[in-house]
Image: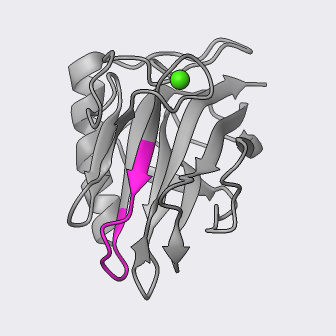
Amino acid sequence: MKASCRSRVLVVGIGLAVGLSSVARSENALLNPGFEQPDGRGGAVPDDWMVYSAKRADIGIAPTAGRDGTQCIKISCAGIPRHFQGIIQVVNVEEDGRYTLSAWVMNDRSNPLQGSAYGQLAIEWKDDEGREVARTWGEALKPTMSRMRWELAQINRAQAPKGAVAAVIGIHLHEGDRGGKGSFLVDEVSFVKE
Ligand SMILES: [Ca+2]
């Protein structure tokens, strides 16, 4: 699959570039989890995160729309059938450990998701050579998600599989067979060891 190959390449680069943050019990392992850096630069890729896409990434900071602090990110459709994109960060994990990934999400009030598009949380478990061991997906965040209030999306107590030493934490937008329109917002992503 093009997606997994592409993200695998990116993952190696991230690990070398910034080092891997480790997960202490009950502490959020993610850096810049609320997308407050860089400050005030609408559309910028948030610090400590990386975006990928099949063709065109449209993911960046929304400076005044945050649930916590002032900023969040907005992920917008490219309008291309079967297109996908996402924003990722890599952390260390311990095999057999249980981890919860959560994020606050809300549909974009002025330009909500439409068509076959949906957002999704994911954890890609990686071995010590950067190979994907397994992938845990969250529920689809459909165009029916609220435009009025933030909702918590979660993957609860996912168990790191045998051989997993790292996890690629991702928030993805799939446009589906018909392609999508619109955007959704994400803030306060958390990845904790239970
Ligand atoms: Ca924030």
Residue drawn at x 28%, y 18% is 18
Number of numbered discs on residues: 0
Among all residues in the image, which is located at the extreme bottom? 178
Q: Is residue 138 left or right of residue 14?
A: right
**1 or 59, which is in the foreground?**
59
Q: Is residue 56 left or right of residue 125?
A: left
Would residue 167 be found to the left or right of residue 153 on screen? left
Residue 88 coordinates in the image, percent (x, y): 40, 40
Residue 155 in sight here: yes
The secondary structure that dominates the magenta segment is loop
Q: From the image, which quarter does the N terminus lie in?
A: bottom left
Say left or right for 8 vs 139: left
Q: Residue at x 64, y 11 (%)?
A: 24
Q: Position of residue 161 (x, y in %)?
A: 64, 45
The image shows residue 26 at horizontal and vertical percentages of 74, 15
Does the segment drawn in magenta span residue 75?
Answer: yes
Query: Where in the figure is residue 123, as x and y percent of width and height?
Result: 56, 46
Q: Residue at x 50, y 48 (%)?
A: 171
- In this view of the protein, which residue sits in the foreground, 49 or 145? 145
- Magenta residues, as a range? 74-84
Looking at the rendering, in which quadrant would you find the C terminus? top right
Residue 43 on the magenta segment: no
